[in-house]
């Protein structure tokens, strides 16, 4: 396989890093995950926009200009001959330098991007999943898609150990988002989600759900809800690039609504399917 780096496309075996790499030692970098359906990038421009915004927020420069990066990612896809469902992982770090907290004097960021096959989560999308609720112990700048994922890793591990699909995070009883997803609550036909403040990552699928609601005439409120509200919801669902839209049918030990995916969630799933056509065919 081929990997895109700041030096251009290289073979997988050629990509190695010294121990003193700022992504490894400090998590000093940002990343993106982009979906491909049948070998076509989905919402690439939106993801690249967010990448440059995340980078700017930590005063990091991305090695290529946006149009050039998009062109090189297409080259990467072509060289790897990707025609199936897959994901692109892309990260940019502040580079390889002797370990010191402050920025290096030289601007020499590292970038790598690779594509790996990833099937759609069809069972979860159809049947729905169970989630747990746990404390959001992250820093104040969760809108930056940074490599510092330790709190997210610990929350997801807790979910896995408790047999759940995702960990839903709360700050002082207010639900923020999932460990690697955004969460939505449906009550009396209205869709609610945490506003896109510094306390959550504004997911690309989240912004699409907002758009679909507008198109479908479903009231959409960017208004936070509490852990207590979860149990009273008619429907809950989560979104992310790797999960698309997945119904939540149980929170800890509480069944949500009828215990089946709800009608609003299903209409948004249908809108997602339509929006990602023809790439998402079959
Ligand atoms: N929130 C967090 C913390 C995430 O890590 C992710 C993605 O993995 C999301 C939300 C969903 O974002 P997107 O829809 O852009 O994948």
Image (tube, rainbow, N blue to C red):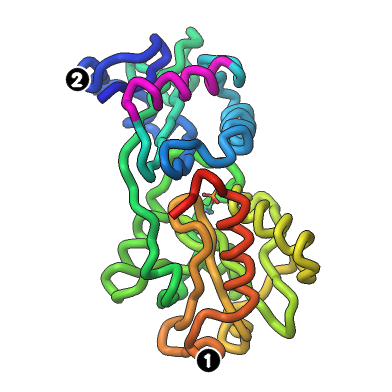
Q: Is residue 220 left or right of residue 26?
A: right
**Label 1 sits on residue:** 258
Q: Where is residue 234 in the image (x, y as percent from the top left)?
A: 62, 85
Q: Is residue 258 above or below residue 226?
A: below
Helix, strand or loop: magenta stretch: helix
Q: In this view, does 65 lie above or below 177?
A: above
Q: Which of marks 2 and 1 is in front?
A: 1
Q: In which quarter of the image is residue 210?
A: bottom right
Q: Which of 109 and 38 is in front in this view?
A: 38
Q: Which residue is drawn at 40% across and 36% down?
A: 89
Q: Residue at x 54, y 45 (%)?
A: 278
Q: Position of residue 6 (x, y in %)?
A: 42, 14
Q: Does the residue labelled 2 lie within 8 Å of ligand 1?
A: no
Report the magenta residues as a range: 68-81
Viewer can see residue 261: yes
Label drawn at residue 13: 2
Q: Which residue is drawn at 73% across and 55% down?
A: 211
Q: How far apart are marks 2 and 1 (CA)?
A: 51 Å
Assess whether residue 79 is covered by the magenta stretch. yes
Question: How many numbered marks are there?
Answer: 2
């Amino acid at each position: 396989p081929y990997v895109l780096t700041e030096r251009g496309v290289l073979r997988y075996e050629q990509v190695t890093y010294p121990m003193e790499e700022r992504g490894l030692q400090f998590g000093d970098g940002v990343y993106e995950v982009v979906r491909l359906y049948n070998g076509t990038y989905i919402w690439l421009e939106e993801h690249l926009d967010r990448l440059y915004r995340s980078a700017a927020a930590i005063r990091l420069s991305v090695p290529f200009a946006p149009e050039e990066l998009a062109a090189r990612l297409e080259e990467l896809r072509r060289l790897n001959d990707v025609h199936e469902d897959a994901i692109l992982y892309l990260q940019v770090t502040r580079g390889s330098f002797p370990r010191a907290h402050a920025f290096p004097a030289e601007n020499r960021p590292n970038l790598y991007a690779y594509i790996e096959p990833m099937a759609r989560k069809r069972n979860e999308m159809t049947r729905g999943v169970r989630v747990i609720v746990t404390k959001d112990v992250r820093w104040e700048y969760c809108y930056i898609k940074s490599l510092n994922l330790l709190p997210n890793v610990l929350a997801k591990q807790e979910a896995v150990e408790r047999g759940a699909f995702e960990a839903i995070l709360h700050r002082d009883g207010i639900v923020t988002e999932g460990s690697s997803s955004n969460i939505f609550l449906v009550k009396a036909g209205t869709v609610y989600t945490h506003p896109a403040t510094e306390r959550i990552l504004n997911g690309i699928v989240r912004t699409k759900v907002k758009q679909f609601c507008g198109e479908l005439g479903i009231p959409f409120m960017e208004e936070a809800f509490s852990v207590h509200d979860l149990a009273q919801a008619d429907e809950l669902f989560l979104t992310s690039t790797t999960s698309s839209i997945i119904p939540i049918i149980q929170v800890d030990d509480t069944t949500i609504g009828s215990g089946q995916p709800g009608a609003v969630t299903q209409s948004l799933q249908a809108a997602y399917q339509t929006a990602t056509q023809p790439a998402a065919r079959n």
